[in-house]
Image (cartoon, grey):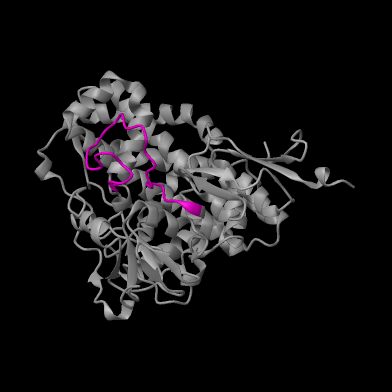
Amino acid sequence: MSGVEQMWRVHVDPTRCIGSGICAGIAPGHFVLVGGLSRPVAERVAPDDALLDAAESCPMEAVVVSEGDGLRRIAPEP
Amino acid sequence: MTEAPETIIPQRYPFSDPVRLDLDPRYARLRREQPLTRVRMPFGEPAWLATRHADVRTVLGDPRFSRAASVGRDEPRNTPRRMQAGILEMDPPEHTRLRRLVAKAFTARRVEQLRPRTRQVADELVDGMLAAGPPADLVEHLATPLPIRVICDLLGVPVTDQDRFHTWSEAIVSTTSLTGEQAQQYVDNLLAYMGELIARRHEEPTDDLLGAMVRARDADDRLDAEEVVRLAAGLLAAGHETTVSQIPNFVYVLLTRPEEWARLRADPQLVPNAVEELMRFVPLGASSAFARYALEDVELGGVLVRAGEPVVVSIPSANRDETVFVEPDRLDLTRQSNPHLGFGHGVHHCVGAQLARMELQVVLETLIDRTPGLRLAVPESALTWKSGLLVRGPVALPVAW
């Protein structure tokens, strides 16, 4: 199995982010606040439940986790 | 790098009793000269107090600072007894598991769906206010009933029970307004009441948030039933005691600055921006609570906070930080860059923030539309302010139109 399928893609929509710091608190290794807004530390990462928690906890639904090819959204749930 | 904390005599904190919505001038001096300072609250061990925006954000957002570590400590506090704080004394991942139960119901998207109904409620309440005056008390007719109806609808709590739980809710924001026994009794009443509502939902499932919490709890046995009850009670109480005070605070600030009220009336599109600025400008908190404990040594604000030491923050002070906000002491309804911390920061960031924003926007829009000539019906000096609570707000706000 190649690594690509196993990887997740993390995106923070800067137009929605309000810099609440929730994602960075839940998944500190994965998000960092830059200029008051959240940014993923790495766009492609190994699966980690903390990422799902971060996406499900964002009040703006600005954190999106999808499969490595970026096609299927894993979190947040609609 | 600095003196050991035990050699510094801590200042009494809060520095002074709250006066209207004024901020004690000591905060500005501390931000300049001593951004982390030693304080002693009425009860509990001495603490550091953070007053700068950047430091406050670090204490609230950095996982090296913990709420869970406050359990079993003589936490700095306003009340003789340490109250159990439920979700507010947890760190991730325990905190996350519980918060995820309710976070979905408070996303911006879900809150937007409540806006039309909230507008309708605001309109009905303003009808009642107009019929009662002028003058009429905006706290009684609008600021108190609106947030209560909205949170009751959302949770699925019968609004007809509000006389009971409104009294009990005060316990979560009381500092000296209630005795320790009273506060504990009120909390127990609130938990018993909520426990009953939740138990009923096991028999008769519902589509409201309490129903969803019950279903989620049944599907995940890692969730503690008592914590779910405590969380629901916390939402009901928090939904009362914060927006209920912020509505009259916002209206007071605007009506005592008639040029700002006129500006908003002339351009209602400004309302969302105005709500953010008022969240920054109004020092809702009369004291600090929920100290964060350092899990390791952390350099902060020019001092070394050692592992195991508690830090409290002043959000009102952070919101006036001159290195972040241009002319911080001026109310500027058109302010563009506004990273205020009015809803907190980090994992405990107010879960109801989007709901509160929507309610505050609806209230201002409704008042602009229905009562453009709104004004105080008494001299400003005749207003009385709440005391003995964690939050500030006028007891009554008599208005005319």
- Tally of marks: 0
Left or right: where B308 falls relative to B197: left
Name the one closer to the observer, B364 or B39: B39
Residue B386 percent across, percent down from the top left: 23, 53
Residue A78 on image: x %, y %: 67, 36
Name, please, the residue furthest toward the front: B1
Q: Nearer the viewer, residue B323 or A27?
A: B323
Main SS, magenta residues: loop
Query: Splitting the image into 4 quarters, where does residue B258 fall?
Result: top left
Q: Residue at x 41, y 31 (%)?
A: B121
Q: Which residues are magenta?
A: B320-346
Can residue A54 be spotted in the picture? Answer: yes
Q: Is residue B323 magenta?
A: yes
Residue at horizontal 34%, vertical 68%? B48
Instruction: Say which residue appears at 18% left-offset and 27% top-offset.
Output: B259
**Residue B82 coordinates in the image, percent (x, y):** 40, 72
Camera-nearest residue between B168 and B15? B15
Taking the image as shown, residue B197 lies to the left or right of residue B391, namely right
Q: Is residue B24 above or below residue A20?
A: below
Residue B192 in view: no
Front-most of B163 and B314?
B314
Task: Say if the magenta span includes residue B108.
Answer: no
| Residue sticking out furthest to the right | A1
| Quadrant in which the N terminus of chain B appears | bottom left
What x and y, as percent, mark residue B369? 31, 21
